[in-house]
Amino acid sequence: MAGGGISFLSSRLWDQYKNNRLSFPDLPDLAELSTFKTAADITPSEIASMPSVNIDDIPDPNGPGIVVAPENDLEDGFKHTERVVDVDTIDELQEDEVNFYLEKIRNFDGDFPGDVYLSEINQLLLQPTIDRLERVQRFIGHGNFNLIAFDEMLYFARNYEEIGEFDPAELAFMEEIFFNDATEYGFFGEKVNPQLTHRINQNEVEKIGGSGHYLLKGDSLNQYQLIHKDVGEKLLLTSGIRNVVKQMHLFLSKTRQSNGNLSKASRSLAPPGYSFHGIGDFDVGKIGLGEANFTIDFSNTEEFKRLITLGYVDIRYTDTNRYGVRYEPWHIKII
């Protein structure tokens, strides 16, 4: 059940989890399988001892539940306004292309000539695929959904009727989205995570209290703690590490909101595999600002003004970035 930013399992599922202490298989990569149906036939006897979803983090339904910060599932956006800081240069475009490029990222929620759309068949698959992903998220909890691997998602879907097994066409659709060359959409970022079945090692992440999100230990965690100390208690982690499944859900949701326009979706959100959230970047906001933390409003806060005066902080997507993405003043660059 989910509502009002709080997510929890039913009492029956909670008891089942606590009694069984589920762990997950070291499953083969989907690329090594002849069909998705073969992946769906993996049996419980193949389950090994490498958990990725920490069952202890699933809240007891008799307790208060987990409070989840707003996700980066962006709504229709704002008209860009400039800021006066050092920015990246656009060095991969010809001079006569720069103005059109900037117009697109500054009016990211518009439709432009040359935009790429979902095929007719994939348009039909979009909503049922999103619905099943959301059932997985409700089942395991919002925090765990940031970490779950693709094969673990298949396991849950196959074994729990509350989710229902993914149709082979839905899986083929997600595989197509993942392996597409995003430059065709107008997204020019690096594919930093080329494996659909990438697994996050839980020993390498730390949950940030009060946020419902996780950060990679090391540079990400250290920088967030330093920023929080220097900016103040009103600074909040709004999104941390996100594995492929989470990014897939966000990107498909943005594509649905964009009426199937993949180029428009990618101007607001990195396609799965291309998000630096998968390898260390994170988002910050101001407590109390809510979803406006993912709009230009955040750049007008005292917290952001302090943030950009810190000599050790970089913004991933500046207002003249060369990735084909909207300006994101909340997105902290780590790698």
Image (cartoon, rainbow, N blue to C red):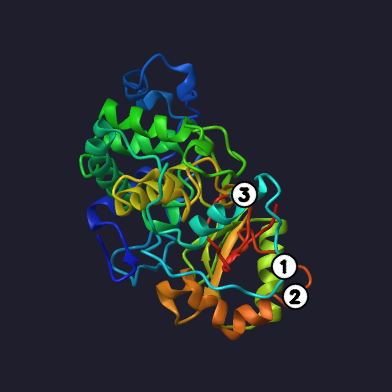
Q: Is residue 251 rendered to the left or right of residue 50?
A: left
**Where 305 sits versus 142, above or below?**
below
Whether residues under marks 1 and 3 lie with C-beta atoms below 8 angstroms apart, the answer is no
Q: Which residue is drawn at 47% across and 41% down?
A: 185
Q: Is mark 2 on a helix, strand or loop?
A: loop
Q: Which residue is drawn at 37% across and 56% down?
A: 141
Q: What residue type is labelled 2?
A: Leu
The disc, 3 or 2, on the residue closer to the chain's N-terminal end is 3
Q: Which residue is drawn at 25% across and 46% down?
A: 131
Q: Is mark 3 on a helix, strand or loop?
A: helix
Front residue (pair 170, 140): 170
Front residue (pair 268, 284): 268
Q: Which amino acid does label 1 sit on?
A: Val
* Image x and y of residue 204, in percent: 63, 49
Mark 1 highlights which residue? 313
Q: What residue type is labelled 3?
A: Asp
Residue 96: mark in rendering: 3
Mark 2 highlights which residue? 310
